[in-house]
Amino acid sequence: MAHTEPGTDEPPVRYLPGTIAHLVFNRPRVKNALDAESWRLLAEALERFEHDPDARVLVLSGADGEFCSGADLSGNINASSEKVSAKMREISPIIVRLHAMPKPTLAKVDGVAVGVGMSIALGCDIVLASDRARFGAVFSRRGLTPDGGLSWLLPRVVGAHKAKELTLFGRLVDAAEARELGLANLVVPADELDAVADDWSERLAQCAPGAAADTLGLIDGAWNSTFTEALENEAAAQRRAVAAVRAGRSAER
């Protein structure tokens, strides 16, 4: 049974199933920082989404105008190194599942996406941001190092030198700079974010599931493939796509 946030009947992470499913970080009193229960519910939601045959797209967002302020470190900053390592091992499969999800994921970022909140946003396939969004690899401000896969994700988006600048200085990046750096696909006025996210997610939901999964796999796998291997992988994916199209046409006859 999920725990609820103090003073509310709401769980710290809400999952709303559907063709376009929604996952909402829901701890507004701490700008949606993730505690242990949040991580558990996030893992559960990702599993439900992945195995739901009717779910096509997952939209991640945060309650009350904030995406996610990172991990809730209260009570953990003095933990032993063994406990920290154990916690990282618990979180890593959740981040991997999000990044490797064979269905499109869309981060709808309003307000802050910092620390592991930034890692989660960049782990999605599409990032839409409002003009008041702020991104930050703020780990260094607390004497910590990047986590949540950010050391892998960030240099692939902005390049190694810029990634080192952002992580060492830990400064916040506003929406305009985030768009320029490629951290966000699109920046829109805050009052238009929901409508644009709805439009994009509906368009993503129209993609053929098999072709969408293969497209995501091809792009994500390109980092670890040679050019020749990429061509071979594309040919295999195209064979599957053509077969699925033919099967669909046959079923319509």
Image: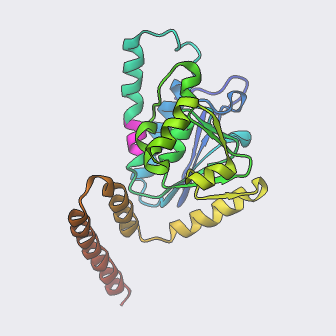
Q: Give how far across and how far down residue 195 sits, in percent.
A: 71, 62
**Image vertical order of residue 171 relative to residue 19, above or below:** above
Q: Would residue 214 be found to the left or right of residue 182 on screen?
A: left
Along the viewing direction, whichever of 61 and 4 lies nearer the viewer: 61
Most extreme residue toward the bottom, as rendered? 253
x 73%, y 51%: residue: 131
**Image vertical order of residue 244 relative to residue 180, above or below:** below
Q: Give how far across and how far down residue 171 sits, in percent.
A: 63, 34
- The stretch in magenta equals 93-98
Most extreme residue toward the right, as rendered? 191
Location of residue 13 (image quadrant): top right
Along the viewing direction, whichever of 93 and 112 lies nearer the viewer: 112
x 29%, y 74%: residue: 238
**Image vertical order of residue 2 relative to residue 78, above or below:** below
Is residue 250 visible in the rendered structure shown here?
yes
Location of residue 134 (image quadrant): top right
Q: How many marks?
A: 0
